[in-house]
Amino acid sequence: MADLVWILVSAAVVNNFTLALFLGLCPFLGVSGKVETALRMGLANIFVMVVTAVAVWALNTFLLPSAPYLRIIAFIIVIASLVQIVEMAIKKLSPALFRALGIFLPLITTNCAILGLAIFSTNRGYGLVEGVFFAVGAGIGLTIALVLMASIREQLELADVPDAARNMGLVLILAGALSLAFMGFAGLFSTA
Amino acid sequence: MFETLTFRHGVHPPELKQLTAHLKIRRLPYPAEVVLPLSQHAGTPAKPIVRAGDRVERGDLIAEPDGWVSSPVHASASGTIMELGLSPHPDGTFKPALRLAVEPFSGQIPRPRLVPDWRGLDRAGLLAAVQQAGVVGLGGAAFPTHVKLKPPPDKPISMILVNGCECEPYLTTDHRSMVEYPGRVHLGIRIMMRILGVSKAVIGVERNKPDAIDALARTRPDDLDVTVLPLTVKYPQGAEKMLIEAVTGREVPSGKLPMDVGVVVQNAASVATIAEVFETGLPLVERIVTVTGLGVRKPANLIVPVGTRLGDLLEACGGLTDDAREIVFGGPMMGAAQANLDTPLTKGTTGVIVLAARECKPQASYPCIRCGHCLDACPVFLNPQQLGTLAAAGRYDEMAATYHLNDCMLCGCCSYVCPSNIPLSQQFAAAKAALRQRKPAA
Amino acid sequence: MTDPRLLVTASPHLRSRDSTPTIMWSVVGSLVPIVVFAGYAFGPSALLVILASVAGAVGAEAAWGRTGVVGDGSAVITGLLLGLCLPAGLPLWMAALGGAFGIGFGKTIFGGLGQNVFNPALLGRAFLQAAFPVALTTWPAVDGVSWWSLRGDNFALPLMSSQVDAVTTATPLGLMKFERIATPVRDLALGTTAGSLGETSALLILVCGGYLAVKNYLNWRIPVSILLTVAALSGVFHAIDAARYPTPQFMLFSGGLMLGAVYMATDMVTSPVTNRGSWIFGAGVGALVVLIRLWGGLAEGVMYAILIMNALVPFINRATQPRVFGTGPEKVSA
Amino acid sequence: MPDVSAFVVSAAILGGVGTVFAAAIAVARTKLYVWEDPRIDAVAGLLPGNNCGACGLAGCRAFAEQLVAGAIQPANCTVASPDMREDIAGYLGVDVGAATPRVARLLCAGGSDVAPHRADYVGLQTCRAAAAVAGGGKACTWGCLGLADCREACDFDAIYMNDVGLPVVIPERCTACNDCVEACPKDLFTLMPTDQHLLVQCRNLLDGEAATGVCAVACNGCGRCAADGAPNLISIESGLAVIDYSRNAAASPDAIRRCPTGAIVWVDGAQQLGRARLATVLEGAGR
Amino acid sequence: MTHGTPSAPPARPSASSQRLIATLGGFGALAGLLIVSVFVATSPRIRANKAAALAAAVQEVLAAPDRYDTLYVTGTTLSPTLPAGADADTAEAVYLGWRGGAPAGYAILAAGPGFQDTIRLLFGYDPASSQLLGMRVLDSKETPGLGDKIFKDAGFVEQFARVRAPLVPVRDGQGDGLPNELVMITGATISSRAVVQAINTTLERIGPIIAAHVPREPQP
Amino acid sequence: MSPRQPAPPSTEFTKGLWRENPVLVQLLGLCPALAVTNSVANSLVMSAAVLFVLVGSSLLVSTIKRIVPSDVRISSYILIIATFVTMADMILEAYVPVVHKELGAFVALIVVNCIILGRQEAFASRNPVGRSLLDALGMSAGFAMTMLLMGTVREVLGSGTFLGVSVFGPRYEPWVVMILPPGGFLTLGVLLLLFSWYTRRGDARARAASSGGADVEEAA
Ligand SMILES: Cc1cc2nc3c(=O)[nH]c(=O)nc-3n(C[C@H](O)[C@H](O)[C@H](O)COP(=O)(O)O)c2cc1C
Ligand SMILES: Cc1cc2nc3c(=O)[nH]c(=O)nc-3n(C[C@H](O)[C@H](O)[C@H](O)COP(=O)(O)O)c2cc1C
Ligand SMILES: Cc1cc2nc3c(=O)[nH]c(=O)nc-3n(C[C@H](O)[C@H](O)[C@H](O)COP(=O)(O)O)c2cc1C
Ligand SMILES: Cc1cc2nc3c(=O)[nH]c(=O)nc-3n(C[C@H](O)[C@H](O)[C@H](O)CO)c2cc1C
Ligand code: SF4
Ligand code: SF4
Ligand code: SF4
Ligand code: SF4
Ligand code: FES
């Protein structure tokens, strides 16, 4: 249990996917403009990550032992196709949910964070439960980073930012500051 | 009870009332000309019924109300109507007004009893008489009094609340009225009680006017349920929502009126005026005005004919000092600066403050440091910090939709406390104006 | 009467006397005793380090800020506070670099005073700590050296590492975390222990902060909620396992908590504007301090706790908009 | 160790995975597909994307939907260049359509040289804020305050403030989006078709010397233009000349010749509002 | 972008399902073939690299044995053969070194959470004397300049060739001189403790298994 | 760019360097740009891998673009890209094992690198083979340029070395933060600010040069 907590906390804050591992930055910059959108994107991410964790576990257990060199390609295809199908299903079954979360799904599919999750949990040899905890932690971490950044950016939209700094450079510097702040979580729960 | 009766938040500006608080009310000599705007009240402007060259006596009707939420205008002096033209208005624009040349040596004797005796009137008659006498609120907004005295039947009124706070610094108009005419206040309450069918009245007075509290308590008629309630000295204690909160502990719901909580709030001088018009039979043609500030030579509390031009008034007060710099109608917290000495005083002018240059050095503005002092000051619990940032970005719709701009009463507390000197309430006034202008177009 | 040339301005025509520069310079004034105490405890090195970080901060403000903003005094505060959370033996070039980074990347880039998200002084320190972790955790010993001696290689050449091996020692928090040795609270309160320049005299900081709180230049709710949260949480854990977790008194008076709670968490620009938000912010800082100190990898967590909560401030502000008069359930505001 | 079987296995796995998911997608797209006219996105992509609302619709995408539906014509987008309109028309196979171009016109010529301030306004430097403080301190309370709210409101950089502090509209850039009209607290902008040339650049309701006392180029209501212009084209209402544009066809520059203050003008292209203009007006009026 | 005006408005999806499946299936098979070819070409080198890296590490922690055997942990015993169903790359193993015909100690893998992320290391251990023989960090993300001293600080690493299990971490200058004390790195206490902890926990589990194992030199 | 005539081939190459630089302008592929630029060597190897994948898949995609049905377009591209990535991964592991280990998962993550998929979607699937090749080369060069820039700044400040060679001498105090995550964000942030400052200055100049009468009057 303690290990599971550590996996979750570590993925969420200590080794935050966005701020410490540099995963999923393109959408991080793209959809962190509004808190509302950021939150939805985060939730959609958690969902896809859990789906991914399960798929990865299945692949690692049943298919890949016989052909480990197909790992990358199998992961990506399975994830991409799964998400596409889920997307279509949501669009059909619940248009409201689709508008809220679904529109982010294609953005997420082709995103480092998802494949990164797959590769990390494979490298660390996570089982199904550990993998899901890892996925939830990573998703929460991504959501935290997105929402924090979005609320900061909403505030800065009204600030007197010099024209020359009104671009993504500023967002990256903010991410740097956030990343500095998150260094405070280093070593959390890692030593008894 | 010590220091308990008040509202939450608010500010403590210096009171600065000592210049005129002790001065007896005097009568201003008639000027050579008065200018009577057709729009001296909230609501539809009055319709003129005289033409250039007409001769009128003091108190004669010269413009009649145009509908229910409207108020008539009466000649404030005997003389001749010169023209109906545009005249500068206290709101900074030019508005239609009747110019009247005052007869130089007239005794200014009005026709007898233009307003009937109140004792013989029923409710409807009283209400009609109040409207015909041109009585409007003298607390600043000049809202026609008869409208407030006829609430819709589904809004039962249980209390009359007389606003004797005069929380604005400098002003002593209501103060002197209460000290010198406490009987009129009580008579006014009696008449309002009859109109509204209410038996309970409370007079709220800030503790810094002990002589007024004393005078009102001394003259209180035994047969009326009237309480004189001393209140904490804090701005804006006199704002009606704050006053109601202090006295009843209830909040007037956002977007609602005092009558929604069963209260009618009327300024003390307005109440005295109701009594006065019935007592004298003369409609509302003059009012008490405090002329004060470091920029005027002889500060005074004056009875002034409505329509007297600012320049004439100041001259009667010894003129401006050499360093007079800014002239404000109303109190220093909410009053409006005037650019034109030809502007006439209207029924709603509570005071004239002349600020000296040393009082109004323009202070440098700094960026907002998010100190939150404005949030702690705002009596209606808005977030002026956020509103100010949104205003600067021109996001007026968001201000109204999310941050309750419409609840802002422009009291100026936020601007007063802001250490960065951000003109918050001015931004809000501008935002409201922009939204108002945009609304009808859309 | 001749028409005077009148002025027309918007109401209100009266303004309170406080102004932003007044507030800022008052804070500077209130920091003077703390700086003097740092000088007394750590010798000339202390004053040099503080001077260097102020120079870095003010220099950056003058170079990159809008014209004429140095006079508002806020950059001086940044420099002073940064200096106060550095070790005395730090090479001066690092102190100046920290000040310049804090102002440049923590403030002017957002548009200067009032626009920043993170506390510039702490951002500068976080940068320094991540850049030069060893130098930033080299604590000179408090006693056994003459007042006049430098407490480290303050004069190391820019970009170069220090050449002198100073006498160093562990901080009370380091001793606690890694050795489970508690320093007596009396020593902590009086400031006779090792640590950064301003984390030494908790009592003095409380007194100076009290002055600012009385003048309403800082929001007392923030330090109060931080200290209460730390005391409560550490009290609970100490009660559960006294051998493992330090006493609340130790937690309150050790490390940078006092300086952080009184002077840094209260930076109005980077803390919530609402009073309800301030309580939440303070509680958050307190909880994070306890979390990092008790279970984190670092001995001290005040800086990171405040920075992390800084990042949450826009969110807290959104979530704690005041209840507008005449709407919703009536509540008595704090 | 890799031998032939590895090749077979991997080809089979990947081929199989590909096949399975292709089949799944094939099923999904028939069962789950939600159709949306792709032309809407395409047309929205061809529009300028300013979302200015000048077309009267809620942004460019709404305009695109209407275009695809055939409810409106490409020319209704005043912001798009002629090329862009043609692209859209070509793409949808419809007519570009025609709309009379309109531009914003300023109804004031009282720059700082001719219309003085009575009092010094100090405070927030926007027209909107100043207007609420004793009208901004300008002697003519109808006149332009020159604090450029309109320029700030214009998304198309079509307005610049000239040497006497008046906003000048650059007709080539103006898209008639109405933003400046809404921004001006003194209601000094109006959108006019470019084929209307006669214009009274004044809204001051005072007459005679009261008017010229506050602004040298104010309309003083003397009535000369009404007399010189076509019958019923111009009338004087409360001290101001008012043009009846329904009779625009009868308008000619004759009407402006005798105007003593130059308040009425004949515009073609940009309005002339600077010092240079004043010199010619006053010279022409023999003053 | 160069595509300018889009061409004809795309109508509803058109391709037949068979074509879909054929395309994706075909590409899949093709891709599989390509990858396998490269795999076949590179895998000997990759394996050699890995083996070399492992050999170097074992060399270091067992003080240069002549050679070593891979023993897989099967339940509570060690066996030279891969347990059924396990994968050679992932199955837990220890390495038994031989020097001059005698066992030179076991090289054991250990891992544990460090300051930033998991630290993975290999250490040499002699069950007879409970003596450590050496330690090498294989993988860590510890902070450069601080935490990375656990493999860059020679003084720290050398201690592992002498110290006895179970290890007891002590601060510099504060130990009692006992044989199982290990001096931590000042400024990187956490990382050094993490190393100690990882070794101790691994030994707790594997120590008895190793102790029970009788080294038998397999036939060359 | 005029939508009607195609641009000369040379600009297909040069646009990627500056005007449409994938990292600085399109803000794509940021993850590797931040994650692996903590040393110049890593940056270079990563750039080479991207070059290999981008060029390979662009060639293939532009060749087969006609036979892929639109519903499985993206899936097929991903399949193709993943194939090249897997190949690159194995080749790197075989020939530069040390760097491969440092790059970690980021070689595999080239699959989802937004630059590559973006180029297939936006360019290779609509253009002939030759142009696609130029485009791919240009984009890779632009990527490599930025990576090199970042790698240089971060290695020089963060370790005091360039490609492992000391720059400031032995007494240099490295700014460790530069090779940590915050340093990556800060470096790219500053780079973007400088870039935008530079382009804005250029724009302002161009504007001043081509300004019409109105702007002249405005200046007066
Ligand atoms: C649009 C409007 C409508 C009002 N209608 C009523 C009304 O129907 N009855 C009433 O008693 N007061 C009415 N009031 C008067 C207000 O209660 C209040 O007394 C007046 O606005 C002056 O308040 P102030 O000086 O605090 O601004 C109305 C006010 C406004 C602005
Ligand atoms: C901020 C503010 C302060 C006010 N202060 C006073 C005051 O001190 N005395 C007063 O009679 N009315 C004051 N008013 C006006 C009252 O709200 C209310 O309109 C008035 O008492 C109604 O009486 P009337 O209609 O007779 O004027 C204030 C209004 C506002 C918005
Ligand atoms: C940016 C940064 C990185 C750090 N990295 C490590 C690390 O990798 N390993 C470690 O044990 N401690 C690390 N620390 C923790 C501190 O140096 C901590 O004070 C130290 O581990 C304990 O100090 P001591 O050994 O002097 O008692 C780091 C601290 C900071 C601020
Ligand atoms: C009570 C108080 C505390 C402050 N604390 C800090 C601080 O911790 N760090 C800092 O850089 N500036 C501080 N300032 C100064 C100023 O608010 C700060 O530089 C702003 O963040 C710059 O926008 C403080 C100011 C006040 C009034
Ligand atoms: S002016 Fe408006 S926002 Fe400001 S304190 Fe008064 S009511 Fe609140
Ligand atoms: S009082 Fe002024 S500085 Fe303080 S938060 Fe409000 S607007 Fe900002
Ligand atoms: S804001 Fe006015 S000037 Fe600018 S484009 Fe719109 S209508 Fe024309
Ligand atoms: S036209 Fe109106 S908005 Fe424009 S500067 Fe003049 S007053 Fe301001
Ligand atoms: S490279 Fe784009 S999300 Fe990582």
Image: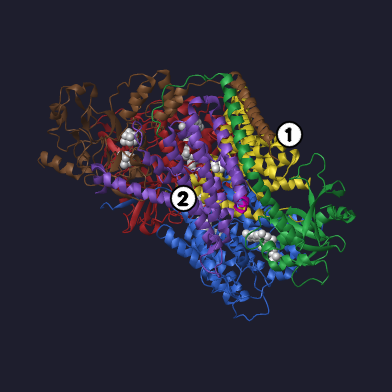
Chain colours: A yellow, B red, C blue, D brown, E green, F purple
The residue at the point 46 percent across, 21 percent down is E10
Disc 2 marks which residue?
Answer: F145
Q: Nearer the viewer, residue B399 or C159?
A: C159
Asked if disc 1 is less than 8 Å from ligand 9, the answer is no
Question: Which segment did they paint magenta?
Answer: F97-102
Q: Identify the amino acid type marked 1.
A: Phe
Q: Secondary structure at mark 1?
A: helix
Identify the mark at residue B18; answer none if there is no mark: none
Residue F98 on the magenta segment: yes
Q: Quarter of the image for the C terminus of chain B: give it.
A: top left
**Residue D275 location (% of width, % of height):** 19, 45
Predominant SS of the magenta segment: helix
Estimate the spatial distance between the alpha carbons at disc 2 and disc 1, rounded to whole Å: 42 Å
Magenta-colored stretch includes residue E60 = no
Q: Relative to the observer, which residue lies in front, B82 or F188?
A: F188
Q: What residue is drawn where x is 42% and y is 20%?
A: D68
Farthest residue to the front: give it.
E220
Ligand 9, seen in the image, is in the quarter at top right
Where residue C325 sits, quadrant-wise, is top right
Discs 2 and 1 share one subunit: no
Q: Give coordinates of residue F182: x percent, y percent.
A: 57, 54
* Residue D276 figure quarter: top left
Q: Is residue D7 above or below residue E64?
A: above
The image quadrant of residue D168 is top left
Label 1 environment density (alpha carbons within 10 Å; few <14, some 14–19, many ≥20): few
Check residue A62 in the rendering and tell me which mark sits there, or answer none.
Answer: 1
Percent x, y of residue C152? 60, 74
Under mark 2, the amino acid is Met
